[in-house]
Image (cartoon, rainbow, N blue to C red):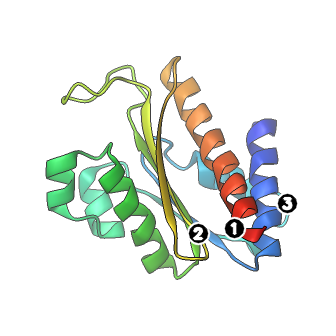
Amino acid sequence: MDTELKQAAEKAGELLLKAECKVATAESCTAGLVGMSLGAAANSGDYFTSGFITYTDNAKHKLLGVNKETLAIHTAVSEAVVREMVKGAVTVSGEAVSLAVSGYAGPDGGEDGTPAGTIWFAWHLPNQQVHAEVRRFSGDPETVVREAALFSLQKLTTLLSDTSS
C-alpha cells in the first residue's frame, strides 16, 4: 500500500471520527483506490463503510442514481455528474459524508476534447454542503489515478477541518 495514500486516509479518518461521521466513496477513474486507501488505514471500520466503483455511465446511473440526461448533456467527467455521484453515495450508503471522483486518467481524453488528466471531484459534508472541484494532473494513467486519489483524501481532510472549526 502506498504510504502517502494510507497516511492521507488516516488523517481523514481522524477527522471523521472526531465528527462522529462515516464516509462512502463513489469512484470512476480511480477504480477503488480511494476506498482501498481508506480500508488500509488504521481503525478504518470505524469511519469507512462503503465504496461504489462506477466506471461506466450505466453503473453511475444504476448504482448511484446519476440521471441519464445529466450524463448525456455534460459527460461523465463533469461537475454535474460528480455532484450527482456524491449525493447518490450519501443516499445509498446512508452516511453523512461521501466523496466522488470521475475523470480521464489517460492516455486519451474525452471525445468532447477534454484532455487526459482532467479529473472532477465532489465532497458531501456532514452539514449537507457539497463542494466540487476540477484538477488536471500530468503523467501516465497510473500516476494520474494515484494523484487523483491522494488529492480527494487530502481535500476531504481540509474540508472536514474547515467545517469543524
- Judged by depth in the image, the label closer to the viewer, 1 or 3, is 1
State the CA–CA distance, disc 2 to disc 3: 22 Å
Mark 2 residue element: loop
Indicate left or right for 162 with 61 as reference: right
Dot 1 or dot 3: first in sequence order is 3
The label number, if any, that marks residue 163 in the structure image: 1
Mark 1 residue element: helix
Indicate left or right for 34 with 77 as reference: right
Indicate left or right for 63 with 4 as reference: left
- The residue under the point 52% across, 25% down is 137
Indicate left or right for 87 with 161 as reference: left
Task: Please tell me how crowded label 2 is: few (under 14), some (14-19), or many (20+) other residues with Cα within 10 Å.
Answer: many
Residue 5: % across, % down: 73, 42
* Amino acid found under the numbered disc labelled 3: Ala
Q: Cβ–Cβ below 8 Å for labels 2 and 1?
A: yes
* Amino acid found under the numbered disc labelled 1: Thr
Residue 8: % across, % down: 76, 47
Residue 110: % across, % down: 26, 30
Dot 2 or dot 3: first in sequence order is 3
Q: Mark 3 = which residue? A: 42
- Can residue 102 be seen by looking at this rendering? yes
